[in-house]
Amino acid sequence: MRRFVSMKQFEETLHEGFRIVLSVSSILYHEKTSHQELIIFDNPIMGRVLALDHVIQTTSRDEYIYHEMLVHPALVSCHCWRHHVGDSSPIDVLVIGGGDGGTVRELLRYPSTHVVMVEIDRSVIDLCRRYLPDHSLGAFENERLHVDIADGASYVKECGKTFDVIIVDSTDPIGPGEALFGEEFFTHSKHLLKEGGIFVNQNGVSFLQGDSIKRTHHVLKRLYRAHRFYQACVPSYVGGVMMFAWGSDMALHGRWTRAQRKAAQERSAVGPMRHYTPDVHQASFVLPMDCPI
Ligand code: AG3
């Protein structure tokens, strides 16, 4: 078997014929868990890096861009909708994947969120708490978070609960992540959404993973009245901008007042946001002509 990580360098194998290589200053952890091969190493530019099955998942340097953009467009829109219909009950969020804790950290900024996180691989949670503690920043100790170690695809079929927002923070559509891009998963997820609910997932990079983006779009079009994509540039995910899919039966919202945003940041124990702003939110839904969808 070819080794993709040595004491000197890590080579990502996601795209055939297009490789990113990162130098390795030290390997902190390397094992085959019961689900995937997990590597945590340090790189002089990106900081601490987590790779699963030889694909970079997150780095301490740029994780905030991905996690803020995965979470806040949906949460802000959900708040706008709740405000509109006069509903101030807790916001129930389902996270599929997200074992490093970055997504739940961002979700728990909002005092009214209650989160169920379904992660297939317990080792990801345990090792990220140890080696990437700033991702979760104490989120795993928060009583508003409930963690289930389970397969997300089966969970959405069987759980019987409903949610205001579903966020899929998965790997790419290969290996354990594949089922999370299938029509069946998207359909079951839709059935778990409350009225006005929002579904968001990561869909890879536009330039190199256009086929998967088109497939997702095809299914979301059938399921949701508002089916959109939005984008963010996350340097660790090379080959175009990162695309996030959006499905909802509610019209696209997102104009949060400055006061609301300030309040959410001030109440947060995790420090201010660094990437997301209401203008970035609006702009991220503007797609160029050569976008795959
Ligand atoms: N999961 C998304 C990784 C995407 C990698 N794909 C790529 N480079 N095209 C990130 C998990 C962070 N919580």
Image: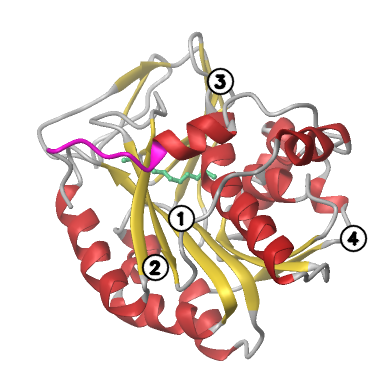
Judge whether 103 appears above or below 7 on screen: below
Secondary structure of the residue carrying numbered label 3: loop
Give the residue displayed 10% in from the left and 33% down from the top. Answer: 17
Residue 138 in the figure: left or right of residue 169: right
| Whole-number angstrom distance, CA of label 4 to CA of label 3 | 28 Å
Residue 183 in the figure: left or right of residue 256: left
Residue indicated by mark 1: 170
Residue 176 in the figure: left or right of residue 28: left
In the rendered image, the quadrant that contains the N terminus is top left
Residue 281 in the figure: left or right of residue 150: left
Between 203 and 34, the one lying in front of the other is: 203
The crowd level at tag 1 (other Cα within 10 Å; few <14, some 14-19, many 20+) is many
Secondary structure of the residue carrying numbered label 1: loop
Judge whether 18 appears above or below 224 on screen: above
The yes-or-no answer for disc 3 within 8 Å of ligand 1 is no
Q: Which mark is residue 180?
A: 2
Q: For the stretch drawn in magenta, what is the main secondary structure?
A: loop
The crowd level at tag 2 (other Cα within 10 Å; few <14, some 14-19, many 20+) is many
Magenta range is 284-289
Tell me residue 52's x, y (percent).
43, 45
Q: Earlier in the sequence, mark 1 or mark 4?
A: 4
| Whole-number angstrom distance, CA of label 2 to CA of label 3 | 27 Å
Residue indicated by mark 4: 143
Tell me residue 221's x, y (percent).
27, 71
The crowd level at tag 4 (other Cα within 10 Å; few <14, some 14-19, many 20+) is few
Residue indicated by mark 3: 61
The yes-or-no answer for disc 1 within 8 Å of ligand 1 is yes
Circle 2/circle 1 CB separation < 8 Å: yes
Q: Quadrant of residue 160?
A: bottom right
Tell me residue 62's x, y (percent).
52, 24
Look at label 4 and name its amino acid: Glu
Look at label 1 and name its amino acid: Ser
